[in-house]
Image (cartoon, rainbow, N blue to C red):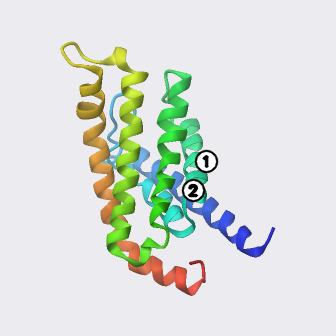
Amino acid sequence: MNNQSIKKITTTSILVAVAVVFDLIVRYTPGLNISMPNGGSPFGISMVPLVIIALIYGIPYGIIGGVIFGFVNFLLDGYGFHWASLLLDYVVAFGIIGLSGLFKGGLKSWKQTLFAIMLAGFLRYIIHGLSGVIIYADYTPPGKTPFFYSFILYNLPYMAATTFISAVILLLIRKKLNDILDESQML
């Protein structure tokens, strides 16, 4: 294994750990620990370091980082009333964030950074929405379709807020992050 591979693995691991810490801070901070009844927080800023992994190293490392975070998040979270929830709501939903690596190197451009975080949020929203329709349809309130409830009433509000807040944070730190990455020759 060469030094470049070790650097990528180490950086990915550190950023996954940062994502876990962000998630725990939000979970245990009064006022930020707002949560939907079956999981999901409007302050899910753990997406920021996961998108950073993908923007620095591309899709493979982004997916691996997301999958690892999703599994750790499942272990810490405890939500999941069905085995398929582990796959969809955790492993796939966070792993798919790695596709924001389509904009690899995008930290140099605020537009590419914004597109990357929007793509990550949108794809994660789709997976959570599908999970609601497939796994949690029985929890749909009377008079609502599982699709409408899952995609519009349940997942859209918190995922829109999460994506917006994550985008603001990532855009605010983008320039400083570029300086740090340039200095350490990580890009």
Q: How many marks?
A: 2
Determine whether label 1 and label 2 are within 8 Å by CB: yes
Towards the viewer: 155 or 96: 96
Q: Residue at left 24%, top 17%?
A: 141
Q: Residues within 10 Å of mark 1 (few under 14, many from 20)?
A: some
Picture residue at 33% right of the left edge, 34% below the top? 36
Circle on res. 150: none
Give the structural element (helix, strand or loop) at label 1.
helix
Reading the image, the residue beneath label 1 is 68
Residue annotated with mark 2: 16
- In the image, is residue 139 above or below residue 150? above
Residue 140: image location, x then y, percent: 29, 18
Q: In the rendered view, would you say 186 is above or below 11? A: below
Image coordinates of residue 112 in percent, x first then y, are 37, 69
In the image, residue 162 above or below residue 170: above
- Taking the view exactly as shown, the residue that stands out farthest to the front is 102
Q: Residue at x 63, y 59 (%)?
A: 13
- Which percent across, then down, holds residue 46? 45, 53
Quarter of the image for the N terminus: give it.
bottom right
When the figure is inspected, residue 187 is found, relative to residue 49, above or below; the finding is below
| Left or right of residue 45: residue 55 | right
Q: Amino acid at mark 2?
A: Val
Residue displayed at 43% across by 45% down: 28
Q: Is residue 169 something one can see in this rendering?
A: yes
Q: Quadrant of residue 73?
A: top right
Label 1, label 2: how far apart the Cα atoms are: 7 Å
